[in-house]
Amino acid sequence: MRTWTMLACGMGLASTLSVAGVFDITATIHGKSSSISLDSADDSINILETPSIRTFFAGYQGTEVVSAEINFRGVPIKMAYPTANSTKLVLEVPSINLNQSFIGATRDESEKMMGDFIKKNPQFLEAFLKTSVKLSPVDPVAGNPNSLMSRAVTQDSQAMWLGSGARSGGSGSSNTFGLGVVYGHFVSDAVGAAKSMSSDGFTLPLTYSRQFDEANHELLVNIPLGYTTVDGSTAYDASLSAVYRYPVQPNWVVAVSGGARITGSKDLAGGGWMASLGLSSNYTWQGEGWSLSLGNMVGYYKVMRVKYDNTTISPDVANTVFRNGLLFSWDTPWALLDTPLTIEAFVIDTRYTGTELFSNYQDEIGITFGTKRSLSAREADLRAGFSYITGEHLNGFKANFGAWF
């Protein structure tokens, strides 16, 4: 069964038992049931191995009728030895219409056969990954605000606001660097087989900006690093993307973006890499001490093919994302670092089309405080903010702080 690690697209799986986690298991033997929650995918899938069953039923001899129902972070899985003194192992994943039996000389051999079957059947892995982004509220690839796809959309959509005057350049070319931290906490609804789950995500945005002579003409290179925790399970992600902004008019800026991202989780048994391409627009109405920006973005995000141990997996997960919003900026009477202190308020609507996800839309409302970089400023630009997010089957908030030097 150890080859279930393929679900992590090459990331090995952890094996530490826990009394709380995202994998809920109910094992039944002799008509008696016992339940436990784990934070390791490997432990949950290997639950019918003799040492694991004996953590539930100390007298298990390895020949009894035994079954396990696994809530695999929202995806139901059933495994059983349905006949006493038999080595027939049955695996069921109803969401992908899988019902497969394995009969070895021993039960250990049956479990190895199941592992080999999974390892050599990319169709199973592809189907499982696709159903996971639909049914799981904590899939690391897509379907929730702390997933790789959602973070990519947020990163690419920064170009929606950059034409609002917060960083407009325009007095000769210059190079700047940005860093910050973003924290997001989200709670999902109990939907289908998934219980309510919470996740905490941390992103460290690292950005390089090349500002050209013309105002709002800029190239940005982003290298954000991410970390997510879900009831003791962890996931990691990293990205490399670029945004090129060009001013069509003094108050209208368009931008193209593209990037590659990767995520993996030993605990959650999920992972993959993603390519993206986006187009965004920012139109700003400027007043005396205020501005109103209309931001629009459309982007395409696709989970790409990966090869592991001579098995090629091509997940059919791809989404066209529409993100639209308004941002109002007001110059306060106060100053920080010899630049005006501004308050910004914004609303954003995000819609995912294509592959069905656990959460296909979210709305965000927020506020930020910080300095406003003037045309000739070279001092640090600081900004902090908070936003509330609600959407299909979830709600939560984000807090962020960033600086440009």
Image: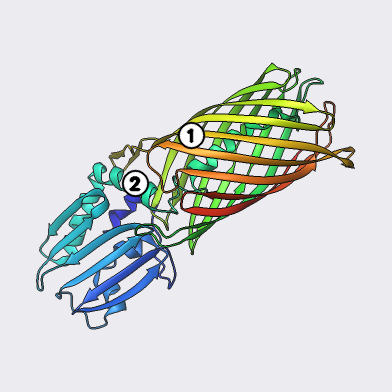
Location of the N terminus (image quadrant)? bottom left
Residue at the image point whose x is 15% and y is 73% from the top: 65
Location of the C terminus (image quadrant)? top right
Q: Is residue 311 left or right of residue 175?
A: left
Q: Position of residue 187 (x, y in %)?
A: 51, 58
Label 2 residue SS: helix
Residue annotated with mark 1: 321
Q: Is residue 311 visible?
A: yes
Task: Name which residue type carries label 2.
Answer: Leu
Which one is nearer the viewer's eye here, 274 or 149?
A: 149
Indicate whether 400 appears above or below 213.
below
Task: Name which residue type carries label 1.
Answer: Val
Residue at the image point whose x is 32% and y is 37% from the top: 314
Which one is nearer the viewer's eye here, 79 or 104?
A: 79
Mark 1: few, some, or many residues within 10 Å (few <14, many ≥20)?
many
Which numbered circle lies on residue 85? none
Mark 2: few, some, or many residues within 10 Å (few <14, many ≥20)?
many
Residue at the image point whose x is 21% and y is 50% from the top: 97
Residue annotated with mark 2: 129
Q: Position of residue 117 (x, y in %)?
A: 20, 50
Q: Is residue 395 left or right of residue 221?
A: left
